[in-house]
Amino acid sequence: MRIALIGYGKMGKEIEQIALDRGHEIGLIIDQHNPKDLCADHLQNIDVAIEFTNPDSAFGNYLKCFEANVPVVSGTTGWLDQLPEIEKQCAEGKGFFYASNFSLGVNLFFELNKKLTKLMAPFKEYNVDMEEIHHIHKLDSPSGTALTLADGIIENHPKKEKWIEATSMKEDELSILAKRHGAVPGTHSITWHSEVDEIMIQHQAYSRKGFALGAVLAAEFMPKKEGFYGMKDLLQL
Ligand SMILES: NC(=O)C1=CN([C@@H]2O[C@H](COP(=O)(O)OP(=O)(O)OC[C@H]3O[C@@H](n4cnc5c(N)ncnc54)[C@H](OP(=O)(O)O)[C@@H]3O)[C@@H](O)[C@H]2O)C=CC1
Ligand SMILES: O=C(O)C1=N[C@H](C(=O)O)C[C@H](O)C1
């Protein structure tokens, strides 16, 4: 498979290594210094583009790939206000795969979070909050993963209506505390606490390898596909 890497930073480089190990070819590399190369001519022989850039660049990159009819796998976070336009283009025949987190472990953690929320919801003795810790270079906050976890709680808890990036005493608000520290690849913790005890579930990434492998597996899934896909389609969760 010929892959275009859009974004050649921490994730782009990790993905390149795994893609080469799995026998793929990197046909094009785009970063901030050469974004003009992201045009239909250069994308001609590309089977799939993998996009890991930043919240401001991602949407424009998707549209350029769509113009060239190249399906996109994207892990960039912080652009979801433009999701309706991407969904519209997918309904019209473009191919797009998005995950706030591509690791197998986090996607199992998403399911565990929903199940635990359903179990805890009837017990008013317990309230819930979330903490995420990432490296100091991260641009968006809370993380995309934290927002997916928050959706999993809000959809399954009758009292929680919205998340807030602060400590909240309000019953309808889910507090998310975002911390930035050193080179942490990504740690997410959810704590259900009562006056007498607490139950905590946590996912801690040891490196970016799990994210990168998931993105390459998604890329292998996407060539010639139309529509909007996510990890549930890939992992059949
Ligand atoms: N879904 C998931 O599983 C994961 C998602 N992420 C997300 O992926 C994104 C990237 O993360 P990470 O690799 O750590 O970030 P980095 O900052 O290390 O890399 C970003 C890359 O994007 C490039 N870039 C910036 N603007 C453009 C542009 N207009 N066109 C093309 N390339 C551009 C940068 O170029 P230059 O080097 O020249 O500045 C750099 O190569 C973030 O949004 C992060 O939250 C991260 C890990 C896992
Ligand atoms: O920026 C990162 O590094 C990460 N971003 C994703 C997110 O926002 O959830 C996934 C992972 O946590 C690493």
Image (spheres, rainbow, N blue to C red):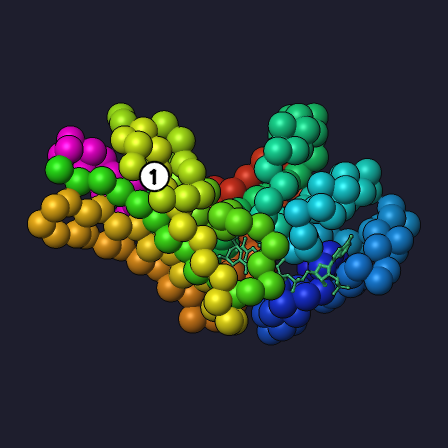
**x and y percent of residue 134 in the render?**
49, 61
Magenta residues span 112-124
Residue type, mark 1 in image: Ser
Q: Is residue 105 visible?
A: no
**x and y percent of residue 144 in the render?**
51, 47
Q: Assess mark 1: CB under 8 A from ligand 2?
A: no
Q: Give the quadrant of residue 26.
A: bottom right
Quadrant in which the N terminus appears: bottom right
Q: Is residue 141 left or right of residue 10?
A: left
| Residue situated in front as seen by the camera: 28 or 157 | 157
**Residue at the spot 55% in from the left edge and 65% down from the top edge:** 136
Look at the picture and state if 70 lies above or below 220: above
| Residue 115 on the magenta span | yes
**Residue at the spot 19% in from the left edge and 52% down from the top edge:** 199
Look at the picture and state if 36 lies above or below 96: below
| Residue situated in front as seen by the camera: 159 or 23 | 159
**x and y percent of residue 197 in the render?**
12, 52
Tally the marks. Answer: 1
Look at the picture and state if 114 lies above or below 212: above
| Residue situated in front as seen by the camera: 135 or 1 | 135
Q: Give the quadrant of residue 24.
A: bottom right
Q: Is residue 106 left or right of residue 84?
A: left
| Residue 110 on the magenta span | no
**Residue at the spot 37% in from the left edge and 53% down from the top edge:** 131
Q: Which residue is mark 1?
A: 168
Helix, strand or loop at label 1? It is loop
Q: Is residue 77 visible?
A: yes
Prevailing SS of the magenta stretch: helix
Quadrant in which the C terminus appears: top left
**Residue at the spot 35% in from the left edge and 59% down from the top edge:** 203
**x and y percent of residue 159 in the render?**
27, 27
